[in-house]
Image (cartoon, grey):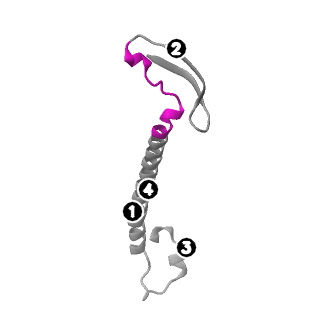
Amino acid sequence: MKIYTKIILDKNNNVIEEEYFNYKGPISHAGIHYDFKSTRGAKAMEKQAKREKKLAERRAKKQAKAQEKGLVEEVKKDQTIPLDTIITLDHLTNPEKK
């Protein structure tokens, strides 16, 4: 079996130059050897999935904080002074009434 290491073709697909060697072993050893370019697509997809997962976690965390903050704001709303009450200096300066 011929294993080509270099093939140069012209625009009409005619062979100009070829380099090869004869191989007489198991076919599994003569397969394609993967390099960076051949696995680039898979790596990019993994990176994007990781990025999206991180973004989803951040969004969930923000929503949890917003809900927690909403509960705190509801408690603060209950501590407001009713509209029919007259605000005095004692309401503004007494720390125990806060």
Q: Which one is in front, 32 or 71? A: 32
Q: Residues within 10 Å of mark 3 (few under 14, many from 20)?
A: few
Q: Which residue is mark 3?
A: 93
The percent position of residue 92, horizontal first and vertical second, equals 54, 76
Q: Which one is in front, 73 or 3? A: 3
* Residue at image location 48% in from the left, 34% down from the top: 39
Which dot marks residue 21? 2
Can residue 27 be found in the magenta stretch? yes
Which dot marks residue 67? 1
Q: Label 3 is placed on what type of residue?
A: Thr
Q: Label 1 is placed on what type of residue?
A: Gln
Determine the CA span between mark 3 and mark 4: 41 Å
Where are the magenta residues, as a range?
26-43
Q: Quadrant of the N terminus?
A: top left
* Residue at image location 44% in from the left, 41% down from the top: 46
C-beta proximity under 8 Å, tags 3 and 2: no
Which dot marks residue 22? none
* Residue at image location 51% in from the left, 37% down from the top: 40
Q: Looking at this view, name the residue that lies furthest to the bottom.
A: 84
Determine the CA span between mark 3 and mark 2: 95 Å
C-beta proximity under 8 Å, tags 2 and 4: no
Determine the CA span between mark 3 and mark 1: 32 Å
The percent position of residue 72, horizontal first and vertical second, equals 41, 65
Q: Is residue 53 above or below residue 71?
A: above
Q: Residues within 10 Å of mark 2 (few under 14, many from 20)?
A: few
